[in-house]
Amino acid sequence: PKWRRLVANQCFVRKFEVNPFIFNTRRFICTTDVVLSIMDPSQRLVAECLKLFSVKSTVSSVLLGGFCVAADRALRWKGISDHVLLRGLTDNLGHGLVGLWSWGIVSGARTRQDVLNTLLCGLLASLVDVDHFIAARSLNLKDALSLPARPPFHATSLLLATAFTLWVLLQMMNWEALHILPWICTVAWLSHHIRDGTRRGLWFPPIGSTPPIPYWVYIGLIILLPNVVILCLHSGTIIAKARDANLPSISNV
């Protein structure tokens, strides 16, 4: 009956009165798409990038920087700095927690797999220091901390090349389940190297080392690292959306 159609249409209109859509009898247009459609390509690209970052990830990134400052100050406490074993354990724990926190920002830790990946990133960040014992050929902590040269896992170029090689192999084998692993390795290893870089810089053999990283530059790099990885992981989607954003999509009611 006609009266039922009128009531249904009225309910449908009221449903959209509080919705951020422009509703016009037979069609509605998403206001976000309208804005994107009138932007030039560079503005669309920036807009798509900003969509990736939530308030939660931004706050978490800032808190990560604050944690690094707190962890570095803890290492200078007399009760920790005077004990070689306690200092080494505290420093390594800091590396692990920074890696864990960084991947938590990247993944959002929404699913069980995200949580497992986050734990893996923290573990890999801590395991970098195993090379001290390998290079010293001893389990003695003093021997491991008094090496004449840097151990191999602290070579930034080596670990980045390893992560890239792993990425290429996974792409060739089309192992979708492990496609995220090279990025986990990159976040874990780079976060560790950046923290160590405040003392001796980043080591890029065979080229050499950079100067020591200024303290607040190091904090900024740690904050940026997970967010840059987020952009890299979604770069294909971002570019496609920015390029293909045309007129607003319209669908009949």
Image (spheres, helix red, strand yellow):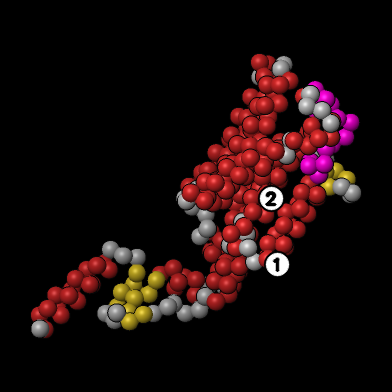
Q: Which residue is mark 1?
A: 172
Residue 105, image x and y in percent? 55, 47
The quadrant of the rendering that contains the C terminus is bottom left
User: In front: mark 1 or mark 2?
Assistant: 1
Is 122 on the left-hand or right-hand side of 148? left
Picture residue at 62% right of the left edge, 59% below the top: 179
Tell me the kind of residue under disc 1: Met
Which amino acid type is shown beneath numbered disc 2?
Answer: Thr
**Residues at badges 1 and 2 in contact (C-beta under 8 Å)?**
no
| Relative to 7, residue 133 above or below | above
Point out the stretch of residues depicted in magenta: 142-155
Where residue 138 sits: x, y (%)? 82, 28
Which dot marks residue 186? 2
The image quarter in which residue 200 lies: top right
**Residue lying at 54% horizontally and 64% vertically, measured from the top left:** 48
Determine the residue positioned at 45% across, 72% down: 33
Q: Is residue 3 magenta?
A: no
